[in-house]
Amino acid sequence: MSDRSRLHARRSVLAVPGSSDRFLAKAPQLDADMFMLDLEDAVAPSEKSEARLKVAQAIRNTNWGEAIVAVRVNSFATAYTLRDLVEVVTAAGPRLDCIVLAKTASAHEIAAVDLMLTQLEIEADLSSGQVGIEALIESAQGLADVRAIAGASSRLEAIAFGPGDLAASLGIPMGIVGDKLPDYPGDHYHAVCMELLLAARSHGLQVIDGPYLGLADDARLREMSLRTRALGFDGKWAIHPDQIAVINEVFSPSEEEVARAREMLAAMDRAHEQEGRGAIRHGGEMFDEVNRKMAIATLARLPHTERVQP
């Protein structure tokens, strides 16, 4: 898969309707870490074919900067998946970083996408493994198989959460998609989030929260973002450009966290290189290899251009 897709932060993932020329043209001007050009829910059945062409042309002919460029294809429960993959991958060129598989239901589906991408990369003269995969979990079946899904392909980069469709699949009453249930004494999706997190982390994958569909409510968006950031999620979908700034802020480490992480790494490097020690006392604390891992994880949340050590 591309270095961009493998190493880049996914704090904010903006969903962009693949049938809209206006939104496809506007998206690259925005500050999202990843753009997910959508061929699924945002595109009516009658527009699927034309949307594939628009998405491929937008990927090939637009300057996307350093952002991850992905396409959400329709699920295998539809008649569109094959044509989505064939027409987009062969026409989009090397700037396509990732395929997001809607309503991923099993590890077999990820394996199938992997095999098709291998063939399409050959046909399109792309590097082997150029295109990554992100699995979108939004059904009871997908949730039940998520640990196998997370290990189904070396192309996998992330596991993403679809709260609206999962609520429908499980029979959970839902008000605003991505919000808490007022009648439930706690977070009704806490167990789901932890299951996705465990599956993703056990295979070295990022894990992305789904959208909050309440518009013009930055306070609630922040609260819902902080909820999964506290668990360890890497980012969250945005369904409107106005949500990007809040999501980027929440899923970025603070200046204090960055400074502390760099201090930890510097102290551990000195201990290893100059003193030959694996654990040290520093500023009233004990630092060891665990602190190094925590510091590296913190800095990995920074935008790619901000990761260089001073």
Image (spheres, rainbow, N blue to C red):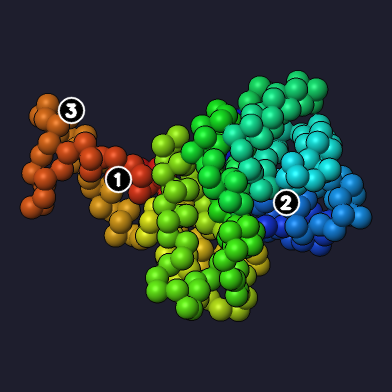
Does label 2 or label 3 sit earlier along the sequence? 2
Callout 3: few (<14), some (14-19), or many (20+) C-alpha neighbours within 10 Å? few
Q: Which residue is mark 2?
A: 37
Percent across and percent down for residue 160 are 56, 50
Q: Find numbered disc 3 in the image and state the secondary structure of the residue it sits on.
A: helix
Q: Find numbered disc 2 in the image and state the secondary structure of the residue it sits on.
A: strand
Under mark 3, the amino acid is Glu
Residue 121 appears in the picture as rendered: no
Q: Tell me if residue 43 comes above or below residue 122 in the rendering.
A: below
Percent across and percent down for residue 25 are 78, 57
User: Disc 1 vs disc 2: which is toward the camera?
Assistant: 2
Depth check: 205 or 277 in front? 205
Residue at the spot 41% in from the left edge and 37% down from the top edge: 202
Label 1 close to label 2 by CB (< 8 Å): no
Percent across and percent down for residue 104 are 64, 44
Q: Is residue 123 left or right of residue 132?
A: right
Q: Is residue 258 left or right of residue 189?
A: left
Callout 1: few (<14), some (14-19), or many (20+) C-alpha neighbours within 10 Å? many
Compute the Cα span from label 1 to label 3.
18 Å
Residue at the spot 52% in from the left edge and 56% down from the top edge: 209
Depth check: 218 or 224 in front? 224
Callout 2: few (<14), some (14-19), or many (20+) C-alpha neighbours within 10 Å? many
- Image quadrant holding the N terminus, namely top right
Q: Tell me if residue 238 comes above or below residue 96 in the rendering.
A: below
Spot the residue most to the front.
171
Residue at the spot 61% in from the left edge and 53% down from the top edge: 138
